[in-house]
Image (cartoon, helix red, strand yellow):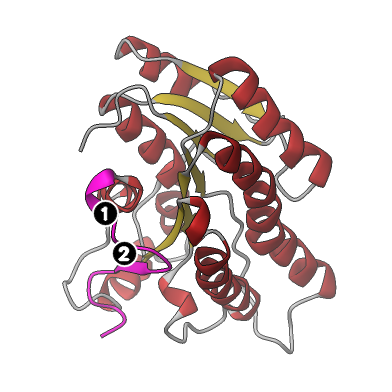
Amino acid sequence: MSFDNKVVLVTGGVTGIGKAIALMFAKNGARVAVNGLPQIGGDDVMTAVKEMGRECIWVPGDVSREEDARRIIAETVSVYGRLDILVNNAGVVYPGRVDNTPEEVLQKTMDVNIKGVFLMSKYAVREMEKQGGGTIVHIASVAAIKGVKDRAAYSASKGAVLALTRAMALDYIEDNIRINAVCPGTTLTAALRERIESAADPEAEEREMVSRQPMGRLGTEEEIASAVLFAASDEAGYMNGSSIVIDGGMSI
């Protein structure tokens, strides 16, 4: 898959899966814009991309705020002149059932995980319409299609992302804008490793997480990134409104 001269914007692209996505796009020729919260710098990603001989810019902002979403898109287009691919990766996850999840946690989850996707897409499609097309990949979750204990708000928000994916695919199909989603299972990111190591019994915690995957292991950031690149690629040009589930068999 080649993304030579394509402009890619990755939200939540500073750490974890988002960082892996940004780096893999750059490795395959893309010019990259990386977004994250203002207090979290993008220096590491920018340095890594530039060491590959590729272009990269840091565009801080909170995707759940409309003025930020508008500015993030505008700054990307101002620097690169266009926007070919948007990856809506920014997200939050909090534990909880419906009976013990505080309203503010529910609101924060919905603001970032679905409102942020909605707002970033709103301003991205306007630019893509002007240039004759583009593609958007939403990062959903296996929790959108399979029940996961103690993740009520998160599951609801990611289910909404899948519904939005299908709605957008129909809305923009005549504008040559493809919309797809990737649904990762449990992926061994630095944040997850920290959570495991902070547990009372780290080995038991890791065994419990691994046990949910019939393949007997956790996913890697690079495996999820590869699925995202495929969804955004010309090779997937006939795929629209679809979701790629990459979860080690968890949803079987």
Mark 1–mark 2 Cα distance, whole angstroms, equals 39 Å
Secondary structure, magenta segment, majority class: loop
Q: Residue 152's spot in the image, x, y percent? A: 61, 81
Decide whether residue 52 is among the magenta residues.
no
Residue drawn at 46 percent across, 87 percent down: 147
9 sits left or right of 99 in the view: left
Closer to the chain start, of discs 1 and 2, is: 2
Q: Residue tagged by mark 2? A: 203
Q: Residue 47's spot in the image, x, y percent? A: 43, 14
Q: Residue tagged by mark 1? A: 236
**Does the image show residue 242?**
yes
Q: Residue 29 sits in which quadrant?
A: top left
Residue drawn at 48 percent across, 38 percent down: 15
* Three-letter code for the amino acid on which mark 2 is drawn: Glu
Q: Residue 158 sits in which quadrant?
A: bottom right
Residue drawn at 80 percent across, 46 percent down: 65
Residue drawn at 34 percent across, 50 percent down: 228
- Contact between marks 1 and 2 (CB within 8 A): the answer is no
Part of the protein shown in magenta: 234-252
Q: Residue 69's spot in the image, x, y percent? A: 72, 41
Q: Residue 5's spot in the image, x, y percent? A: 36, 22
19 sits left or right of 62 in the view: left
Q: Is residue 13 above or below residue 96?
A: above
* Three-letter code for the amino acid on which mark 1 is drawn: Ala
Q: Secondary structure at mark 1?
A: helix
90 sits left or right of 51 in the view: right
Query: Dot 1, how many residues are within 10 Å of its Cα: few (below 14), some (14-19), or many (20+)?
Result: few
